[in-house]
Amino acid sequence: MAKIRITQVKSGIDRTERDKRTLIALGLTRMHRTKEVEANPALVGMINSVKHLLKVENV
């Protein structure tokens, strides 16, 4: 599987509870934190639901 680098670029403050929980599930708890994850369908769906808060790069 391909790896994806995700970085939180916008705050989760004043977002829906669903968006906040999705960020936590992705392992992003603060601004400008970066994670490298394997691109599987479940994670890609989570990333797409909060893509307005993230920067996504292929590794």
Image (spheres, rainbow, N blue to C red):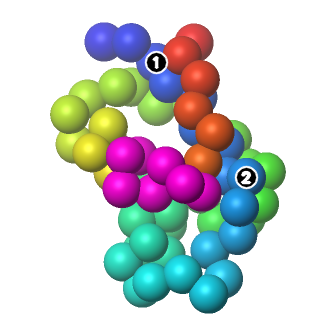
Q: Amino acid at mark 2?
A: Val
Q: Quadrant of the N terminus?
A: top left
> Is residue 32 found inside the magenta-colored segment of the image?
no
Span of residues in magenta: 47-53
Residue at 67%, 52% (x, y): give it.
8
Q: Of the residues under marks 2 and 1, which one precedes in the sequence?
A: 1
State the residue at coordinates (77%, 60%): 31
Residue identifier under label 1: 3
- Type of secondary structure dominating the magenta stretch: helix
Q: CA distance from mark 2 to mark 1?
A: 19 Å
Q: Quadrant of residue 57?
A: top right
Q: Is residue 51 magenta?
A: yes
| Residue pictured at 62% horizontal, 74% vertical | 12
Name the side, left or right, on which 51 lies relative to 40: right
Query: Residue 21: x and y, percent?
Result: 42, 74
- Camera-side residue: 37 or 58? 58
Q: Which residue ends up furthest to the right in the rendered image?
A: 32
| Amino acid type at mark 1 | Lys
Q: Is residue 27 visible?
A: no
Q: Kindly state the secondary structure of the residue where label 2 is placed.
A: loop
Q: Quadrant of the C terminus?
A: top right
Q: Nearer the viewer, residue 17 or 52?
A: 52
Residue 2 drawn at (x, y percent): 39, 12
Residue receiving disc 2: 9
- Residue 34 in view of the camera: yes
Disc number for residue 24? none
Contact check, label 2 and label 1, Cβ < 8 Å: no
Closer to the camera: disc 2 or disc 1? Answer: 2
Q: In terms of secondary structure, where does tag 1 sit?
A: strand
- 59 and 15: which is toward the camera: 15
6 vs 33, left or right, is left
Q: Eyeballing the image, is 37 above or below 43? A: above
